[in-house]
Amino acid sequence: MHLIKTLTRHLTSAWPAVSLSVFAAGPAAFAQTNPPVVQIQADKVTAQTPPTFYGLMTEEINFSYEGGLYGELIRNRTFKADAIQQNLKPDAYDPTKYYPARYPANPAPKYWNRVGDATLALDADTPLNDALNVSLKVDAPKAAKTAPAGVANGGFWGIPVEPRTAYKVSFFAKAAPGFSGPLTASIESTNGAVLASAVISGVTGDWRKFAATLKTKSVPPSKDNVFKITTTVPGTIWLQEVSLFPPTFKNRPNGDRADISQLLADAQPKFLRFPGGNYVEGNDFVNRFNWKQMIGPVEQRPGHKSCWGYWSTDGFGLPEFLGWCQDIGMEPVLAVFAGYTLNHDHVTNGPALAPYVQEALDEIEYVTGDASTKWGAQRIKDGYRKPFALHYVEVGNEDFFDRSGSYEGRFAQFYDALKAKYPRLKIIATTPVNSRVADVVDEHTYVNETAMEAQAFKYDSRDRNSPTKVFVGEWATQTSSPTPNMAAALGDAAWLCCLERNADVVLMQCYAPLLVNVSRLTGGDRSMQWSYNLIGYDALNSYGSPAYYAQKMFSLHQGDEVLAITAQNLPVRSAPAGRGGGSREVKSLFYSATRNHASGKITVKIVNSADAPQPVTLAISGVKSVAAKGTATVLQAANRDETNSLKDPQHVVPVTEKVKDLGANFTRTFPPCSITILELEAK
Ligand code: AHR
C-alpha cells in the first residue's frame, strides 16, 4: 500500500529552487490541508521547446535490429555466428584494415538444421568473397523426390507468416560438378505444411545470386514455421547470404519491419541517437562499430560480434540507420567511435588517435556530404541521394568508465578537428570535460520508480549560466521486465515533466533501451540482454509498454514555448525505497506546461503517481481567458502493476475525451496512477 499524505515537512535546504519560490508565496501556502495548487505563468516563457526534444536511442541489443526492426527473417544468414575473431590491443590494430574471422571445425553453423539426410558443414575453403569468407556446404547424396534434403532455419524464434503476403527470398549458391538443381525454397510450418514455395533453377559451379518470391495464400498468421532450401536431386551445394524479407516499412529494400516501425513513427520522435550506447564502442577494437565495413552491398559487409553477445551481419549498417531516420522523419544524432572500447582499451590522444578522428570526419561526410565529396558520393551510391541534416555529434559513449583519464585528450582532439571542418556542429561529450567547453554533455539515468520520482526536480536547480547544455541520452524507470508497467510509466512521466520544464537546459532526451525481442527472456540463447525496454515483440507481433504510451503522449502534445510553472502543497507518498528494503517519502504530483505560440493553446501535463484520486487547483495567470471546454488525454491503470504484453497489447493505452469546467482557475481531480494532458484553449 502506498500512502497519500499532504506534505507535512517544513522546508529544508534539500528542497529544489522551484519549491522555494512557491513556499515563499504566503502563509497560506504552508497550510497542510490545502489541496495542491499548480500555477502557470502564461506571460513568462522560460524556454523555446528545442526542435529535437523527443527522440529515440538505439543500438543492437535485445535483438533490436536482427530479430527486431531489421526486416531480415533468417538468423545467421551469413553463417558467421561461429566466427573467431582476434582480440587485438589498440597498438597492434590498424583501424583502416579488415581483420578476417576464422572458424571452428564445426559440423553445422548455428541456427541451421539439416533436412532429410543432408550433411551440413561450415566451409572456409569455399568463400563467397573476403567479407563473407565462409559458406555452408550442403551434401545431399541421397536426395530424391520422396526424400528431399537440404537446410532449414527457424529464424529469430520463429518465421512469421501472414496471409496473402509476398516474401522475398534471395541467396548465393554454387554447386559441385554434376549438380544443376533445381532447388526449392519454402516456408513450412513446424508440423510440415508448406505455406509458400518457389523452385529455383540454374545453379552452376560458380557463385551466383538467386531470388524468388514466396507467396502465402489465405493462411492464418503464425510464427511456428521454418524456412527451407531443399533438393530432390542428389548433389553438393554451397550457400551464402541466405535472406528472406517480408514486405518492409514504406517498401524500402533491405528495410525495416512494418509493425515496429509504425509504433515508432506514431510517437513522432524528432531524432535518432545511434549507433549506441555500448554498441558504438564494442567489446574490443576488432568488434567496435566500424562504419566503413557497414556500407555498400550487404554481401560485402563482414559483420562483427555485437558487445551484447551475438553476431551482427551488419545488414543494418550506417545507410540503414539513415533510411530509418528518413522513413520516420528523425534527424540523426551521430555517435562516433572515440578510441575506447568496453574492455577498457584506449588510444591515447596524438598521432595514434588521428585515424579515428579522420574516420569520424569521413562518417560525417557520408551523412552530410554532397555528390562532390568522396563519402557523400558513396552514400548516394548506397541509395540516399539527399544529404542528411546533422546538428549533433557525440564523441564516444559513457567515457566515465575510462578510468585512465584519456577522455579529456581524446575529446579535445575530436572536438578541435570536428569544429575546424564543421564549425556549426554541436559536439556532445559523454561525461563532463575540462579540456574543452563541450556544447552538450550526455547524462544517463537508470533508476527505479521511487528514485525517478525523487529526482524529478533535478534540473530545476541546474546552473543556468553554464555554456554546456544537457542531453539526457539514456534514461528509464526500471520497474518490471521485459517492458515497463504503469509504475514505470508514472516515474517516466514525472521525469519527462522535469525535462520539459527545463528545456532551456535540457536540449534533447531519449529513453533506452528502445526494443526487446521477448521470445526467450532467460537461458543461454536468450533474446533479452537488458531487462527494461520500451517496446516488445516476437517474430509476429509487437506492443508498446505503458511507458511507450506515456512518451508518445508527451511527444504528441507539446507547445513550442515552455511556460513558467510552480506548485504549492505538493502531496507525498510513501514508496518502496529499493533493493535495501524499507520505504521513503516521495512527491506524488508532477507537472509541466507548454504553449503553442501561434494558437495560444496551453498544454498542461499532470502526473498523479499516488494510489488515490488527487484534486489539484490549476491557476493560470497572464491570459485574458481560458475556455471552459478543452481536451484531456489520460493514461491510467487500475493499479501501478498493470502492463501491456504480446497477449494484451492495448491493456493500458491513453484515452482522449472532451472535458468541461476548465478556466483560468479551476480544480480538477486527477485519477490514481494517472498521467493527464490537458489542452486549454487560452487567449
Ligand atoms: O542502454 C543500455 C546500455 O546502458 C547502453 O548501451 C549503455 O550506454 C548504458 O550503459
Image: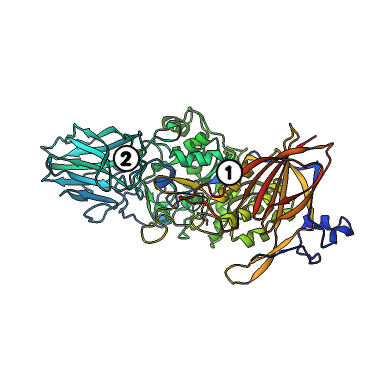
Residue 668 in percent (x, y) is at 75, 49
Q: Is residue 362 visible?
A: no
Quarter assignment of residue 221: top left
In terms of depth relative to the viewer, which is nearer, 483 or 273?
483
In terms of depth relative to the viewer, which is nearer, 471 or 501?
501
Callout 1: CB less than 8 Å from ligand 1: no
Residue bearing mark 2:
243
Q: CA distance from mark 1 to mark 2?
A: 31 Å
Check the picture and name the quadrant holding the C terminus.
Answer: top right
In terms of depth relative to the viewer, which is nearer, 658 or 433?
658
Q: Earlier in the sequence, mark 1 or mark 2?
A: 1
Left or right of residue 626: residue 26: right
Left or right of residue 514: residue 450: right
Q: Is residue 608 above or below residue 242?
A: below
The tag on residue 399 is: none
Question: Would you call the spot at circle 1 few (<14 residues within 10 Å), some (14-19), or many (20 or more)?
Answer: many
Q: Is residue 263 above or below residue 109?
A: above
Check the picture and name the quadrant holding the N terminus.
Answer: bottom right
**Which residue is pictured at 51% across the width and 34% down the height?**
326
Q: Look at the numbered disc 2 and give the secondary structure of its residue.
A: strand
Q: Is residue 665 above or below residue 389?
A: below
Residue 403 in percent (x, y) is at 54, 63
Question: Would you call the spot at circle 2 few (<14 residues within 10 Å), some (14-19), or many (20 or more)?
Answer: many
Amino acid type at image mark 2: Ser
The tag on residue 55 is: 1
Amino acid type at image mark 1: Gly
Quarter assignment of residue 561: top right
Residue 645 in percent (x, y) is at 48, 51
Left or right of residue 582: residue 570: right
Quarter assignment of residue 169: top left
